[in-house]
Amino acid sequence: MADIDHEYTREIVCPGCGDELGDSWELSDDDGDEQCGECGITFTWERHVEVTYSTDFAQFEPNRHSHRAELGRRHAAEHARRDKGAL
């Protein structure tokens, strides 16, 4: 019997038969019990969510270009100091 991929999948997958519950994102809860429409077993499921953030300067920020240039110079100077100390 082949292993059924049912952990960390893009849709809810029955661990008994591998049937995929389409549109799993429409379920309103973050966990629950489900009965498989294919094999009839009841199984539990839970939703895993990853949140990430990105930032950038606002387009109207007047100093955004000079600030990036200054950070670049500081970064280069720090690497130069580290490289010099490693000799």
Image: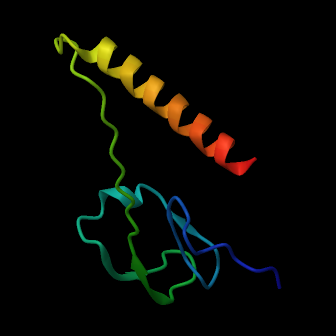
Q: Quadrant of residue 44?
A: bottom left
Front residue of 36/77: it is: 77
Q: Is residue 39 left or right of residue 87?
A: left
Residue at (18% x, 15% y) in the render: 61
Query: Which percent across, then down, holds residue 73?
Result: 46, 23
Q: Tell me the quarter of the image containing the N terminus.
A: bottom right
Residue at (55% x, 77% y) in the render: 14
Front residue of 82/36: it is: 82
In the rendered image of this protein, does residue 15 appear above or below residue 73?
below
Question: Disc count in the image?
Answer: 0
Query: Which percent across, then down, holds residue 84?
Result: 67, 41
Residue at (30% x, 20% y) in the render: 67
In the rendered image of this protein, does residue 82 appear above or below residue 68?
below
Query: Which percent across, then down, holds residue 16?
Result: 61, 85
Residue at (34% x, 55% y) in the render: 51
Q: Is residue 61 left or right of residue 36?
A: left
Front residue of 13/39: it is: 13
